Image (cartoon, rainbow, N blue to C red):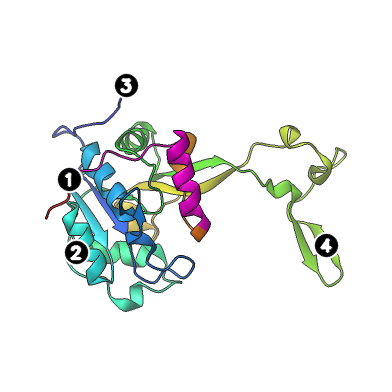
């Protein structure tokens, strides 16, 4: 059963922020490249709108072409992002502050277009998690890591040492089976949702107390490399993943 929500007047107002800069290095044109016949960006916009969780779905982009696509699928693009906030090394907090400077919502969600299998239900569950986790500044999507940091090394000159401090008097992590290691989670690109006050009090998009949002199945899948588009198509073909219900684009 879907947990899609329609926020009552008592719920703190929230805004969805969708980053879609034009300068992707690894996958040029990624945000508007077609997946299952529609621009990748469209699925994030549609999921956000269908969730009913947001007062607005706002796309932050430095490209008028991307802005036109975003508007066609129902998002707002109040203005283009300044070029200096759209480089490959620009911190997220800079463009988020730029997007939020004239807004009054108490909660903001970062929904990256690279996670097309994040659905309205995913968003609703994550928002509910933030609202019910006492003291949390934010929630961030995570999943169990496949490459455990206990088996990672730092190389200096001709020798290497473990990245993590190893347990004393026990089998080293690097010589242990995966199931014997501490459970470690890695963040994925699916979503981040935070109270707006963290932007101004901590100068961050996460704050100091971060609660986990455990993605399920393909919710956390991210398209970051050219071959990821092929993997996404395979997941759709086998039924291992589903796309959000796409809202009809404006012609």
Spatial distance from mark 4 to mark 2, Cα to Cα? Answer: 50 Å
Spatial distance from mark 1 to mark 3, Cα to Cα? Answer: 24 Å
Give the SS element for disc 4: strand
Q: Does the CB distance between marks 4 and 2 fall below 8 Å?
A: no
Q: Which mark is residue 149?
A: none
Spatial distance from mark 4 to mark 3, Cα to Cα? Answer: 50 Å
Q: Which mark is first along the chain, 4 or 1? A: 4
Q: Which mark is first along the chain, 2 or 4? A: 2
Q: Does the CB distance between marks 1 and 4 fall below 8 Å?
A: no
Q: Nearer the viewer, mark 4 or mark 3?
A: 3
Q: Which mark is first along the chain, 3 or 1? A: 3
Residue hosting label 3: 1
How crowded pointer 3 is (Cα within 10 Å; few <14, some 14-19, many 20+) is rated as few
Q: Nearer the viewer, mark 2 or mark 1?
A: 1
* Residue at the extreme bottom: 84
Give the SS element for disc 2: helix
Q: Residue at x 46, y 53 (%)?
A: 229
Residue hosting label 1: 248
Asked whether residue 103 is in view, the answer is no
Q: Is residue 232 magenta?
A: yes
Q: Which mark is first along the chain, 3 or 4? A: 3
Q: Which mark is residue 68?
A: 2
Q: Residue at x 20, y 35 (%)?
A: 11
Residue hosting label 4: 160
The answer to which quarter of the image holds residue 9 is top left
Asked whether residue 18 is in view, the answer is yes
Q: Nearer the viewer, mark 1 or mark 3?
A: 1
Q: Which mark is first along the chain, 2 or 3? A: 3
Residue 144, given in percent of the width and then of the height, sits at 58, 39
**Segment tinted magenta in the rendering:** 227-248
Residue 189, given in percent of the width and then of the height, sits at 45, 50
Give the SS element for disc 3: loop
């Amino acid at each position: 059963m879907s947990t899609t929500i329609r926020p009552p007047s008592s719920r703190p107002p929230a805004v969805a922020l969708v980053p879609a800069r034009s300068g992707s290095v690894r996958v040029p044109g990624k945000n508007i490249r077609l997946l299952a016949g529609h621009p990748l960006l469209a699925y994030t916009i549609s999921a956000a709108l269908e969730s009913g969780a947001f007062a607005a779905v706002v796309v932050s982009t430095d490209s008028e072409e991307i802005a036109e696509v975003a508007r066609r699928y129902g998002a707002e693009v109040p203005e283009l992002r300044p070029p200096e906030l759209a480089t490959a090394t620009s911190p997220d907090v800079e463009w988020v502050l730029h997007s939020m400077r004239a807004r009054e919502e108490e909660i903001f969600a970062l929904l990256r277009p690279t996670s097309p299998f994040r659905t309205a239900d995913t968003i609703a569950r994550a928002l509910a998690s933030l609202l019910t986790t006492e003291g949390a500044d934010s929630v961030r999507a995570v999943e169990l890591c496949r490459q455990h940091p206990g088996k990672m090394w730092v190389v200096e000159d001709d020798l290497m040492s473990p990245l993590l401090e190893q347990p004393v008097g026990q089998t080293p992590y690097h010589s242990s089976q995966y199931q014997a290691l501490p459970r470690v989670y890695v963040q994925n690109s699916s979503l981040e949702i935070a109270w707006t006050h963290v932007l101004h009090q901590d100068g961050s998009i996460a704050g100091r107390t971060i609660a986990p949002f455990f993605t399920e199945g393909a919710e956390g899948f991210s398209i970051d490399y050219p071959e990821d588009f092929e993997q996404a198509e395979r997941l759709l073909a086998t039924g291992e993943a589903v796309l959000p219900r796409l809202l009809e684009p404006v012609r």
